C-alpha cells in the first residue's frame, strides 16, 4: 500500500491508481482547498460565509475515475465574484505534493488578494 505522498508522486508521473483512490483523493483535496481558502479569507479580514465559496463541480467530474485535464473553478460569490482555477491534478494531489501544494497556495492567495481589494473598493464607494 502506498503512502499519500507516494500516491501523489505516482499520479504526477502518470502512473495509474485504483479508481477508488483517485475519487477519495479528489474528494479530500476539494474539501481541503475550499477549507484553506475560507480560513485565509477570514484571516485577511474578508467577510465571507462558508456557503459563499463553492466549486463548479458536477457529480460526474467529482466522481471521475481518472485524473482529467479539466480546470475547475472555486468561486467566492458576492457583489463581485472572485474565481480561482484549479486543474484536476492539483485537487487530486493536494496537499501531498509540495510543488502542487505551492501552486494551490499561490492561487488561493491570488483569490484572497482580489477579494480583499474588492472589499476595500466597496468600502470606499459606500
Image (spheres, helix red, strand yellow):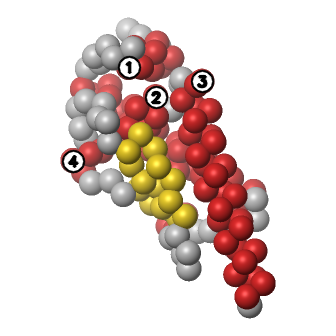
Q: Residue furthest top?
A: 1
- Residue linked to disc 3: 98
Label 4 to label 1: alpha-carbon separation: 20 Å
Label 2 or label 1, whichever comes before in sequence order: 1
Which of the 4 image quarters holds residue 24? top left
Secondary element type, mark 2 = helix
Label 3 or label 1, whichever comes before in sequence order: 1
Relative side of 119 to 6, left or right = right
Label 4 or label 2, whichever comes before in sequence order: 4
- Residue linked to disc 4: 60
Secondary element type, mark 4 = helix
Picture coordinates of residue 113 (x, y %)?
Answer: 69, 58
Mark on residue 11? Answer: 1
Mark on residue 93? Answer: 2
**Label 4: how many residues lie within 10 Å, few (<14), some (14-19) or many (20+)?**
few
Label 3 or label 4, whichever comes before in sequence order: 4
Amino acid at each position: 500500500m502506498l503512502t499519500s505522498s507516494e500516491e501523489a508522486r505516482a499520479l504526477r508521473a502518470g502512473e495509474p491508481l485504483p479508481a477508488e483512490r483517485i475519487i477519495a483523493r479528489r474528494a479530500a483535496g476539494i474539501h481541503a482547498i475550499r477549507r484553506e481558502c475560507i480560513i485565509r479569507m477570514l484571516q485577511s479580514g474578508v467577510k465571507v460565509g462558508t456557503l459563499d465559496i463553492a466549486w463548479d463541480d458536477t457529480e460526474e467530474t467529482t466522481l471521475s475515475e481518472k485524473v482529467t485535464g479539466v480546470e475547475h473553478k472555486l468561486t467566492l460569490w458576492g457583489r463581485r465574484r472572485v474565481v480561482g482555477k484549479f486543474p484536476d491534478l492539483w485537487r487530486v494531489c493536494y496537499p501531498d505534493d509540495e510543488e502542487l501544494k505551492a501552486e494551490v497556495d499561490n492561487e488561493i492567495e491570488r483569490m484572497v488578494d482580489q477579494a480583499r481589494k474588492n472589499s476595500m473598493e466597496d468600502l470606499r464607494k459606500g
